[in-house]
Amino acid sequence: MKKMKFLVSIFAIVCMLLTPLYTNTALGNTATSITYKGNLPSHQNHTYTFSNSKEGILNVNVLNNNVDYTLLQTTTETVYVSGDILPAGEYQIILSPQQYTSVNYEVTISGDVSLTGQTTLPSLNITSPSAANTRLSIGDFDINYSGSSNGSILNYVLNHNSPINLSSSFSKNLNLIFGLNNIGTHAELANKNYITDVRTVVSPGVLRLSGPDRFDTAVAVSKEIQKEGYNIETVIITNGYNFADGLPGVVLGHKELAPILTTRAEYLPDVIKNEIIRLGAKKAIILGGTGSVSSNVQTELVNLGLSVERISGADRYEVSTKIAEKIIDENASSAIIVNGDAYMDALMISPYAGNTQQPILYTRPSSFPAALKTFLDNHPNINQFTIIGGTGAVSEGVEAELAKYGSTYRVSGADRYQVGINIGYGLDFLQRRIVLVSNESDGVPAALLSSLKESQMMLTSPAGLPPTVKDYITGLSYENLLDNIYIVGGTGSVPQATEDYIRSVLK
């Protein structure tokens, strides 16, 4: 089965900096072609804007196959490709490297059109961090950020925070968060051509997120997510003791940038109330019916000033399809299939599902639930299915039924621990970060953290690291393929000895 890649590159961090631009080859003059030339580092995008005053067919000729282009209309954000009829209007052509190497480019736009645009880009020299990717020493969270530019507009974004303006020559100390950090720099000329430069800096190590109980742990995870700088307006509320509804909700949480906060069925714990207030959330999405999250909880959320939406159904199978309806669009073609009673399979796959925005759909081990069949009948465009777990979890008969709707691909393992490892190999989701949990109560909020951090979810045991997981983590570290491990849960679920061992092998 074709693996679907997440359609977000490292340059997504600076998308908020993009502004409508106008580039002119010779300002005020028109032509039937414009040629852009330059050198494109692996960690930059070069953006030129042109105007077209005559509708016609536009051709884009890229001499270097290692360069991708995106051509969009600035007002509508409609994307065009070579050979399309281009209406009159203002456009950007964004050039991106295909590989992790610098490339020279020559791109010509031409056709039965009337174009104006300039070809000059700003200068941008970042002296620190000097490399596209930097790994600090364990425990180090500070870096000098310095450089210069002739841009009339110059600013930077750290992770998902708001842009901060820079002077033409700048040097400042940045305090980073644990894990992966993105520093995006935007330099723009008065002619509105600009460069976006994104450099990654890793602060490696081990971090435990926990609290006195499962609700405090969910809050600790929420606070770690917010450190990225997300503007969080929505929270997802799910039962802290019934995990069936929460796991498909990880994909929705990723889409909405909404922390998953757990609750008791009858009332909202004070620590969860306080976190909602601290976040300044405006909306809550409840997963499950009133037997899982009561009307009283819903009333408490309303009394906190939140608008409330509930996603519910007759059973867990229908709830998973109702959540899926909130995730998919007309272009959706893939879904994850898991046993509705095998929570650990859903837990292990949820970070991948969140990153690829594939809904998690529940099945019975040996038969299709009616809700799943109805969903697939109503969405014939969804025709690629990844099954998680062996035939004991999802039978060959269920796979045969799925095959009537499209192609299937199975990821399994000798046990739940091996399944988590094999997801990385089988789905090309090997990551330099791992989120480690031992139970579902901590795992549901942690799965969203893992998804947003582009991390693999790994399962451990209160008795210690299972041999397969221990060998996997040790091997990654010795090969310098591991940067961060987040341990979610207290020492009763993930013992201190496990943390001590990981710290001893992480380089």
Image: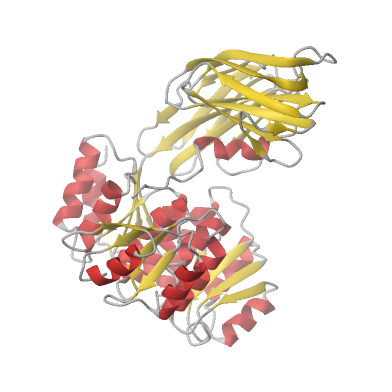
Residue 1 at x, y = what percent? Answer: 33, 50
Where is residue 6? Give x, y as percent: 46, 46
* Frontmost residue, 184 versus 325: 325
The way the protein has been coloured in the rendering is secondary structure
Q: Quadrant of residue 490?
A: bottom left
Horizontal side of residue 425 vs 131, given as left or right: left
Q: Residue at x 38, y 79 (%)?
A: 369
Q: Quadrant of residue 337?
A: bottom left
Asked if residue 205 lies left or right of residue 195, the reply is: left
Asked if residue 257 can be seen in this view, the reply is no
Q: Residue furthest right?
A: 28
Q: Give the number of marks.
A: 0
Residue 11 appears anywhere in the view: yes
Instruction: Give the quadrant of the C terminus.
Output: top left
Where is residue 457 drawn, in percent x and y?
33, 55
The location of residue 292, given as percent across then percent down, is 47, 83
Q: Nearer the viewer, residue 440 or 166?
A: 440
Residue shown at 38% from the left, 67% from the top: 442
- Along the viewing direction, whichever of 155 and 104 lies nearer the viewer: 104
